[in-house]
Image (tube, rainbow, N blue to C red):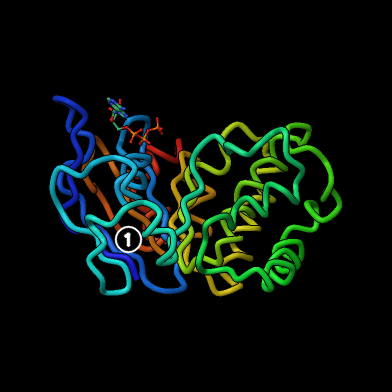
């Protein structure tokens, strides 16, 4: 579904990504793990064309989208949920969700209610809080809202940047269960995580990034067993 080939990104003189390649197949959860500054966020931003690529290519459903604009990429079916939630605090839960469909050709007006219903079924906690202000939600609920908003675009691929960041362990478990449910609903997931242990448990495959390069790749189970991963990322 997604192919990233020899992708490089530079910020001034800094090589944030140094020719990384990976692929995501339909229906998979793929995780990119790695320490601070490894280039995980930059990878997602380069796919969405929020940062400029220095070189390399990105293919989505066999189409070369390397130079497509961000909104075109969304319309093709890639939804990007950035780090730090970034919901609209002054809008209600429902309004935040509807905002996720603005300008989106994939959702017709008459489909909006069905889409909302689908999302509420996946996120019962949001259904209970339809009219609550986004800013008054707990951290975990705000993260759920950010993911739910990303799903309102009815993407084929959803890219999640550190959804567990700053959340309590019990909420983190809930978020990871949700990601599994999103996969079961037929979506493909590209997940970035510092919480390597949890991410590898739910991932079909993963890639370990270090200083802008892919260092190790394998199935979730293989990576959990890998000595280097255990030492560097699982603290074992
Ligand atoms: P973290 O988990 O800490 O967010 P990351 O793996 O997501 O890390 P990136 O945020 O992609 O890493 O950063 C990769 C490298 O690029 C880092 O060295 C970072 O300092 C640098 N970098 C990121 N954004 C910029 C920017 N706007 N200007 C200059 N350097 C940047």
Q: Quadrant of ligand 1?
A: top left
Q: Is residue 86 above or below residue 185?
A: above
User: Residue 230 placed where, x, y %?
Assistant: 40, 43
Local crowd size for mark 1, using a 10 Å CA cut-off: few (<14), some (14–19), many (≥20) = some
Q: Is residue 187 left or right of residue 136?
A: left
Query: 230 or 154: which is nearer to us?
Result: 154
User: Residue 153 placed where, x, y %?
Assistant: 55, 62
Q: Residue at x 31, y 48 (%)?
A: 49
Q: Residue at x 52, y 57 (%)?
A: 103
* SS of the residue under disc 1: strand
Query: 1 or 94: which is nearer to us?
Result: 94
User: Residue 195 placed where, x, y %?
Assistant: 50, 41
Quadrant occupied by the C terminus: top left
Within 8 Å of ligand 1, the CB of disc 1? no
Asked where in the image residue 51 lies, by quadrant, the reply is top left
User: Residue 163 placed where, x, y %?
Assistant: 56, 44
Which residue lies most toward the top here? 13
Q: Is residue 222 above or below residue 199?
A: below
Q: Which residue is mark 1?
A: 218
Q: Is residue 201 above or below residue 8?
A: below
Query: 79 or 71: which is nearer to us?
Result: 71
Quadrant occupied by the N terminus: bottom left
Q: Is residue 155 left or right of residue 69?
A: right
Q: Residue at x 18, y 34 (%)?
A: 10
Count the numbered circles shown.
1
Query: 203 or 98: which is nearer to us?
Result: 98
Q: Is residue 43 left or right of residue 99?
A: left
Asked where in the image residue 73 lies, by quadrant, the reply is bottom left
């Amino acid at each position: 579904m997604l192919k990233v080939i020899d992708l490089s990104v530079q910020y001034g003189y800094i090589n944030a990504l140094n020719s990384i390649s990976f692929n995501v197949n339909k229906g998979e959860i793929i995780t990119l793990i790695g320490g601070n500054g490894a280039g995980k966020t930059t990878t997602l931003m380069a796919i969405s064309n929020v940062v400029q690529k220095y070189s390399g290519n990105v293919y989505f459903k066999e189409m070369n989208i390397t130079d497509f604009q961000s909104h075109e990429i969304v319309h093709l079916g890639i939804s990007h949920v950035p780090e730090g939630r970034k919901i609209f605090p002054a809008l209600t839960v429902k309004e935040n969700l509807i905002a996720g469909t603005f300008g989106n050709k994939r959702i017709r007006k008459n489909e909006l209610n069905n889409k909302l219903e689908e999302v509420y079924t996946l996120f019962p906690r949001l259904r209970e809080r339809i009219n609550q202000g986004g800013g008054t939600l707990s951290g975990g609920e705000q993260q759920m809202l950010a993911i739910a908003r990303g799903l309102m675009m009815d993407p084929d691929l959803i890219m999640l940047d550190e959804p567990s960041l700053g959340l309590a362990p019990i909420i983190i478990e809930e978020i990871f269960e949700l990601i599994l449910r999103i996969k079961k609903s037929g979506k493909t997931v590209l997940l970035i995580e510092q919480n390597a242990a949890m991410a590898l448990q739910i991932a079909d495959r993963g890639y370990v990034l270090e200083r802008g390069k892919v260092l190790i790749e394998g199935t979730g189970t293989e990576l959990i067993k890998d000595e280097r991963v255990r030492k560097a990322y699982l603290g074992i």
